[in-house]
Image (cartoon, rainbow, N blue to C red):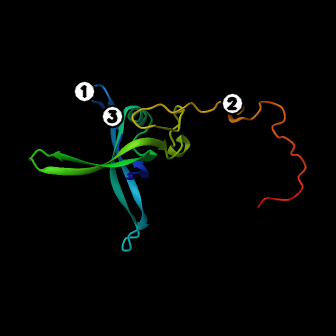
Amino acid sequence: MLNRIIIMGRLARDPELRHTQTGTPVATFRMAVDRDFKDKNTGERATDWIDVVAWRGTGEFVSRYLAKGRLAVVEGRLQMREWTDKEGNRRTTAEVVAENVYFGDSRRDTGDSGQNYGAPSYGGGYGAARPAAPSAPADYGIPSGGDQFAELADDDGDLPF
């Protein structure tokens, strides 16, 4: 089975960070996601308002670095949740459970000249840390310093394709 969703839109409000009774952080927020097509009558794009839930480290990242109006990309899965309202009626809601969240814009694009927020994304599901990014050319197998290109031996010109 496959349940994968990727959405890109703007946060409709600041994320709300709460903690479960066991102390697990969970952030909830709503995103405004424009549809790809325009209405024939009005010429405007319809907007879908999508609820998103981010757990553990992903939720902390979202609550710390994203705010209302910020463009974000959310990758995760669609979840249907049933609940009972105050009148006792059974309700169903759809929400995206975020596994990875990325900035969709840069700080320059938002016009906010504040601190540098560092990492462009966080995810890994259930708060698992991502491996550290390589920090030096040697980490990519490139020798540090000197000539980074090697001379190729002469070829007979017979290409295999």
Mark 3 or mark 2: whose residue is earlier in sequence: 3
Please count the marks in the image.
3
Residue 77 higher or lower than 61, as above or below? below
Q: Which residue is mark 2?
A: 136
- For the C terminus, the quadrant is bottom right
Seen in the picture, residue 125 relative to 19 is either above or below; the reply is below
Judge whether 22 appears above or below 14 on screen. Answer: above
Task: Give the camera-side residue of 132 and 117.
Answer: 132
Horizontal and vertical percent position of residue 131: 54, 32
According to the picture, the residue beneath numbered tag 3 turns out to be 26
Mark 3 residue type: Val
| Mark 3 surroundings: few (<14), some (14-19) or many (≥20) residues within 10 A | many
Name the residue located 41 percent from the left edge and 35 percent from the top edge: 58
Tell me the amino acid under the disc marked 2. Answer: Ala
> Which secondary structure, mark 1?
loop
Task: Kindly state the secondary structure of the residue where label 2 is placed.
Answer: loop
> Looking at the image, is mark 1 or mark 2 earlier in the sequence?
1
Q: Could you tell me which secondary element the residue under label 3 belongs to? A: strand
- Please name the residue shown 27% across and 25% down the image: 22
Whether 23 is drawn above or below 110: the answer is above
| Residue at the left extreme of this rendering | 87
Mark 1 or mark 3: whose residue is earlier in sequence: 1
Quarter of the rendering containing residue 63: top left
Residue found at the far bottom of this picture: 41
Q: Amino acid at mark 1?
A: Gln
* Residue, disc 1: 21
Disc assigned to residue 43: none
